[in-house]
Amino acid sequence: ANKIKLGHVHLSGCTGCLVSTADNNLGFIKILDNYADLVYSLTLADVRHVPEMDVALVEGSVCIQDHESVEEIRETREKAKIVVALGSCACYGNITRFSRGGQHNQPQHESFLPIGDLIDVDVYIPGCPPSPELIRNVAVMAYMLLEGDEDQKALAGRYLKPLMDLAKRGTSGCFCDLMTEVINQGLCMGCGTCAAACPVRAITHEFGKPQGERDLCIKCGSCYGACPRSFFNFEVIDEFEDISEIIAEALK
Ligand code: SF4
Ligand code: SF4
Ligand code: SF4
Protein backbone atom coordinates (compact mmCIF):
# COMPACT_ATOMS: atom_id res chain seq x y z
CA ALA A 1 0.00 0.00 0.00
CA ASN A 2 1.04 3.61 -0.45
CA LYS A 3 2.64 5.40 2.45
CA ILE A 4 1.12 8.70 3.51
CA LYS A 5 3.14 11.92 3.58
CA LEU A 6 3.55 13.07 7.17
CA GLY A 7 4.96 16.39 8.33
CA HIS A 8 5.87 17.84 11.72
CA VAL A 9 5.47 21.62 11.77
CA HIS A 10 7.28 23.17 14.71
CA LEU A 11 6.01 26.54 15.87
CA SER A 12 6.26 28.07 19.38
CA GLY A 13 6.45 25.13 21.76
CA CYS A 14 9.00 23.25 23.79
CA THR A 15 9.52 20.17 21.55
CA GLY A 16 7.95 18.02 24.27
CA CYS A 17 5.23 16.88 21.86
CA LEU A 18 7.85 15.64 19.38
CA VAL A 19 9.67 13.90 22.22
CA SER A 20 6.39 12.21 23.19
CA THR A 21 5.92 11.12 19.54
CA ALA A 22 9.43 9.65 19.51
CA ASP A 23 8.74 7.97 22.86
CA ASN A 24 6.77 5.41 20.87
CA ASN A 25 10.27 4.06 20.21
CA LEU A 26 9.98 1.08 17.85
CA GLY A 27 6.33 1.94 17.19
CA PHE A 28 7.42 5.30 15.74
CA ILE A 29 10.03 3.58 13.57
CA LYS A 30 7.40 1.04 12.43
CA ILE A 31 5.09 3.89 11.43
CA LEU A 32 7.89 5.48 9.42
CA ASP A 33 8.88 2.10 7.92
CA ASN A 34 5.41 0.99 6.89
CA TYR A 35 2.90 3.80 6.81
CA ALA A 36 4.35 7.26 6.54
CA ASP A 37 7.20 9.16 4.94
CA LEU A 38 8.35 12.06 7.06
CA VAL A 39 8.45 14.81 4.42
CA TYR A 40 8.84 17.84 6.69
CA SER A 41 10.31 18.32 10.16
CA LEU A 42 12.58 21.02 11.50
CA THR A 43 14.28 18.49 13.77
CA LEU A 44 14.28 15.26 11.76
CA ALA A 45 14.23 16.10 8.02
CA ASP A 46 16.37 18.51 6.01
CA VAL A 47 13.56 20.24 4.11
CA ARG A 48 13.31 24.04 3.98
CA HIS A 49 9.90 24.70 2.43
CA VAL A 50 6.48 23.40 3.40
CA PRO A 51 5.70 20.56 0.95
CA GLU A 52 2.39 18.91 0.02
CA MET A 53 1.44 16.65 2.95
CA ASP A 54 -1.35 14.21 3.73
CA VAL A 55 -1.12 14.82 7.47
CA ALA A 56 0.57 17.77 9.18
CA LEU A 57 1.21 17.42 12.91
CA VAL A 58 1.55 20.99 14.15
CA GLU A 59 3.30 21.52 17.47
CA GLY A 60 3.25 24.87 19.24
CA SER A 61 1.26 28.07 18.94
CA VAL A 62 1.79 30.88 16.44
CA CYS A 63 3.71 34.03 17.35
CA ILE A 64 1.76 36.66 15.44
CA GLN A 65 4.70 39.08 15.36
CA ASP A 66 6.72 36.43 13.54
CA HIS A 67 5.63 36.68 9.91
CA GLU A 68 7.44 33.47 8.96
CA SER A 69 5.40 31.49 11.49
CA VAL A 70 2.15 33.06 10.33
CA GLU A 71 3.10 32.25 6.73
CA GLU A 72 4.15 28.69 7.66
CA ILE A 73 0.82 27.85 9.32
CA ARG A 74 -1.17 29.33 6.41
CA GLU A 75 0.93 27.37 3.92
CA THR A 76 0.51 24.24 6.02
CA ARG A 77 -3.27 24.60 5.76
CA GLU A 78 -3.05 25.05 1.99
CA LYS A 79 -0.77 22.06 1.46
CA ALA A 80 -1.97 19.49 4.01
CA LYS A 81 -5.09 17.36 3.61
CA ILE A 82 -5.42 16.87 7.37
CA VAL A 83 -4.08 19.40 9.88
CA VAL A 84 -3.61 18.03 13.39
CA ALA A 85 -3.01 20.30 16.39
CA LEU A 86 -0.43 18.24 18.29
CA GLY A 87 -0.53 19.14 21.96
CA SER A 88 -1.99 21.88 24.08
CA CYS A 89 0.11 24.78 22.74
CA ALA A 90 -1.27 24.18 19.23
CA CYS A 91 -4.81 23.44 20.49
CA TYR A 92 -5.24 26.05 23.21
CA GLY A 93 -2.14 28.25 23.43
CA ASN A 94 -1.24 26.69 26.78
CA ILE A 95 1.81 28.26 28.44
CA THR A 96 2.48 30.52 25.44
CA ARG A 97 -0.77 32.41 26.21
CA PHE A 98 1.15 33.84 29.17
CA SER A 99 4.24 34.90 27.22
CA ARG A 100 4.87 38.60 27.24
CA GLY A 101 8.00 38.80 25.14
CA GLY A 102 11.21 40.04 26.66
CA GLN A 103 13.33 37.23 25.25
CA HIS A 104 16.89 38.41 24.70
CA ASN A 105 16.94 37.89 20.95
CA GLN A 106 13.33 38.55 20.02
CA PRO A 107 11.80 40.99 22.52
CA GLN A 108 9.13 41.90 19.96
CA HIS A 109 7.69 38.37 20.15
CA GLU A 110 4.89 38.90 22.61
CA SER A 111 1.60 37.52 21.33
CA PHE A 112 0.90 33.85 20.67
CA LEU A 113 -2.28 32.26 19.35
CA PRO A 114 -3.38 28.65 19.10
CA ILE A 115 -3.34 27.56 15.47
CA GLY A 116 -7.13 27.29 15.33
CA ASP A 117 -7.34 31.09 15.64
CA LEU A 118 -5.60 31.42 12.26
CA ILE A 119 -6.62 28.38 10.25
CA ASP A 120 -9.21 25.59 10.23
CA VAL A 121 -7.90 22.58 12.16
CA ASP A 122 -9.21 19.06 11.54
CA VAL A 123 -8.05 17.07 14.57
CA TYR A 124 -6.97 17.97 18.11
CA ILE A 125 -4.60 15.83 20.14
CA PRO A 126 -4.83 17.49 23.57
CA GLY A 127 -2.23 17.12 26.30
CA CYS A 128 0.99 18.69 27.50
CA PRO A 129 2.40 16.62 26.04
CA PRO A 130 -0.16 14.18 24.62
CA SER A 131 0.60 10.55 25.44
CA PRO A 132 2.78 8.61 22.97
CA GLU A 133 -0.08 6.10 22.57
CA LEU A 134 -2.59 8.75 21.53
CA ILE A 135 -0.20 10.23 18.94
CA ARG A 136 0.59 6.75 17.60
CA ASN A 137 -3.09 5.82 17.38
CA VAL A 138 -3.92 8.99 15.47
CA ALA A 139 -1.03 8.35 13.03
CA VAL A 140 -2.19 4.78 12.35
CA MET A 141 -5.84 5.83 12.07
CA ALA A 142 -4.96 8.69 9.71
CA TYR A 143 -3.18 6.16 7.50
CA MET A 144 -6.26 3.90 7.54
CA LEU A 145 -8.54 6.81 6.77
CA LEU A 146 -6.50 7.73 3.71
CA GLU A 147 -5.21 4.36 2.48
CA GLY A 148 -7.32 1.65 4.15
CA ASP A 149 -10.16 -0.48 2.78
CA GLU A 150 -13.77 0.57 3.34
CA ASP A 151 -14.04 -1.05 6.80
CA GLN A 152 -10.77 0.48 7.96
CA LYS A 153 -11.81 3.90 6.66
CA ALA A 154 -15.09 3.65 8.56
CA LEU A 155 -13.38 2.57 11.80
CA ALA A 156 -10.76 5.31 11.49
CA GLY A 157 -13.53 7.86 10.92
CA ARG A 158 -15.25 6.74 14.13
CA TYR A 159 -11.99 6.78 16.08
CA LEU A 160 -11.03 10.25 14.88
CA LYS A 161 -14.50 11.82 15.19
CA PRO A 162 -14.24 12.78 18.89
CA LEU A 163 -10.87 14.41 18.21
CA MET A 164 -12.39 16.21 15.21
CA ASP A 165 -15.31 17.34 17.38
CA LEU A 166 -12.81 18.65 19.91
CA ALA A 167 -11.21 20.73 17.14
CA LYS A 168 -14.62 22.25 16.36
CA ARG A 169 -15.21 23.08 20.01
CA GLY A 170 -12.83 26.04 19.98
CA THR A 171 -9.41 27.24 21.01
CA SER A 172 -9.99 27.86 24.72
CA GLY A 173 -9.41 25.20 27.34
CA CYS A 174 -9.28 25.39 31.12
CA PHE A 175 -10.29 23.58 34.30
CA CYS A 176 -13.65 25.36 33.97
CA ASP A 177 -14.54 22.96 31.10
CA LEU A 178 -14.33 20.04 33.50
CA MET A 179 -16.28 21.98 36.09
CA THR A 180 -19.18 22.93 33.83
CA GLU A 181 -19.34 19.91 31.52
CA VAL A 182 -18.37 17.01 33.78
CA ILE A 183 -18.37 17.79 37.50
CA ASN A 184 -21.45 20.02 37.58
CA GLN A 185 -23.30 17.51 35.40
CA GLY A 186 -22.75 14.80 38.00
CA LEU A 187 -20.58 12.81 35.57
CA CYS A 188 -17.34 12.83 37.57
CA MET A 189 -16.43 9.43 38.99
CA GLY A 190 -13.40 10.70 40.92
CA CYS A 191 -10.87 8.69 38.91
CA GLY A 192 -8.07 11.26 39.23
CA THR A 193 -7.08 11.16 35.56
CA CYS A 194 -7.49 14.93 35.25
CA ALA A 195 -5.10 15.57 38.15
CA ALA A 196 -2.54 13.20 36.63
CA ALA A 197 -2.82 14.96 33.24
CA CYS A 198 -2.32 18.47 34.62
CA PRO A 199 1.23 19.63 33.82
CA VAL A 200 1.29 22.23 36.62
CA ARG A 201 -0.45 20.24 39.38
CA ALA A 202 -3.32 22.70 39.49
CA ILE A 203 -5.79 19.94 40.36
CA THR A 204 -6.09 18.30 43.75
CA HIS A 205 -8.63 15.80 45.00
CA GLU A 206 -10.76 16.53 48.00
CA PHE A 207 -13.58 14.26 49.12
CA GLY A 208 -13.09 12.20 45.95
CA LYS A 209 -13.72 15.12 43.60
CA PRO A 210 -11.23 17.24 41.69
CA GLN A 211 -10.62 20.81 42.78
CA GLY A 212 -8.95 23.24 40.37
CA GLU A 213 -6.69 26.05 41.49
CA ARG A 214 -7.60 28.88 39.12
CA ASP A 215 -4.43 30.88 39.72
CA LEU A 216 -2.24 27.93 38.76
CA CYS A 217 -4.17 26.81 35.66
CA ILE A 218 -2.26 27.57 32.44
CA LYS A 219 -5.34 26.80 30.32
CA CYS A 220 -3.88 23.84 28.49
CA GLY A 221 -7.09 21.82 28.23
CA SER A 222 -5.26 18.60 29.12
CA CYS A 223 -7.61 17.72 31.99
CA TYR A 224 -10.73 17.91 29.83
CA GLY A 225 -8.98 16.00 27.04
CA ALA A 226 -7.88 13.22 29.38
CA CYS A 227 -11.12 12.87 31.39
CA PRO A 228 -12.92 9.66 30.44
CA ARG A 229 -16.26 11.36 31.08
CA SER A 230 -15.72 14.36 28.82
CA PHE A 231 -15.79 14.17 25.04
CA PHE A 232 -14.97 10.56 24.16
CA ASN A 233 -17.97 8.80 22.68
CA PHE A 234 -19.46 5.43 23.54
CA GLU A 235 -19.00 4.08 20.01
CA VAL A 236 -15.24 4.31 20.42
CA ILE A 237 -15.36 2.85 23.92
CA ASP A 238 -17.48 -0.06 22.63
CA GLU A 239 -14.94 -0.69 19.88
CA PHE A 240 -11.94 -0.35 22.15
CA GLU A 241 -10.90 -4.01 21.81
CA ASP A 242 -11.10 -3.92 17.99
CA ILE A 243 -9.16 -0.66 17.85
CA SER A 244 -6.45 -1.97 20.20
CA GLU A 245 -6.11 -5.14 18.13
CA ILE A 246 -5.87 -3.27 14.84
CA ILE A 247 -3.22 -0.92 16.21
CA ALA A 248 -1.24 -3.79 17.75
CA GLU A 249 -1.45 -5.66 14.41
CA ALA A 250 -0.37 -2.56 12.47
CA LEU A 251 2.70 -2.14 14.66
CA LYS A 252 3.86 -5.78 14.61
FE1 SF4 B 1 5.70 21.57 25.08
FE2 SF4 B 1 3.38 21.02 26.29
FE3 SF4 B 1 3.47 22.82 24.33
FE4 SF4 B 1 3.80 20.24 23.74
S1 SF4 B 1 1.95 21.16 24.55
S2 SF4 B 1 5.01 21.98 22.95
S3 SF4 B 1 4.88 19.51 25.59
S4 SF4 B 1 4.50 23.00 26.35
FE1 SF4 C 1 -4.41 22.38 32.06
FE2 SF4 C 1 -4.28 21.83 34.67
FE3 SF4 C 1 -5.60 24.00 33.83
FE4 SF4 C 1 -6.61 21.59 33.37
S1 SF4 C 1 -6.27 22.55 35.40
S2 SF4 C 1 -6.50 23.26 31.88
S3 SF4 C 1 -4.75 20.38 33.01
S4 SF4 C 1 -3.41 23.62 33.64
FE1 SF4 D 1 -13.72 13.31 37.43
FE2 SF4 D 1 -13.02 13.33 34.85
FE3 SF4 D 1 -11.30 14.15 36.73
FE4 SF4 D 1 -11.92 11.55 36.51
S1 SF4 D 1 -10.84 12.80 34.99
S2 SF4 D 1 -11.76 12.77 38.42
S3 SF4 D 1 -14.08 11.69 35.92
S4 SF4 D 1 -13.27 15.12 36.20
Image (cartoon, rainbow, N blue to C red):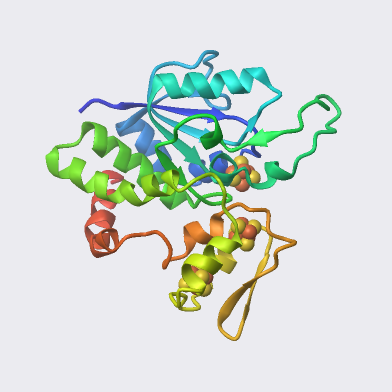
Where is residue 212 drawn, in percent x and y?
65, 69
Farthest residue toward the bottom?
207
Q: Is residue 68 above or below residue 156?
A: above
Which of the pair 249/198 is nearer the observer?
Answer: 198
> What is the quadrant of residue 109 in the picture?
top right
Q: Pick out the residue farthest to the left.
A: 150
Residue 124 appears anywhere in the view = yes
Q: Position of residue 144 (x, y in %)?
A: 25, 38
Q: Can the viewer see residue 198 in this picture?
A: no
Above or below 81: residue 116: below
What residue is drawn where x is 54% and y is 52%? 127
Q: Quadrant of residue 179?
A: bottom right
- Of 53 and 45, which appears nearest the observer? 53
Tell me if 16 is positioned left or right of 164 in this view.
right
Drawn side of residue 56 relative to residue 197, left or right: left
Residue 28 place in picture, x, y as percent: 42, 40
Residue shown at the point (58%, 38%) measured from the top left: 114
Specify the quadrant of the image occupied by residue 194: bottom right
The quadrant of the image that shows the N terminus is: top left
Q: Where on the image, by quarter, is ligand 1?
A: top right
In this rendering, the answer to whether 171 lies above or below 4 is: below
* Residue occupying image coordinates x 68% and y 46%: 95
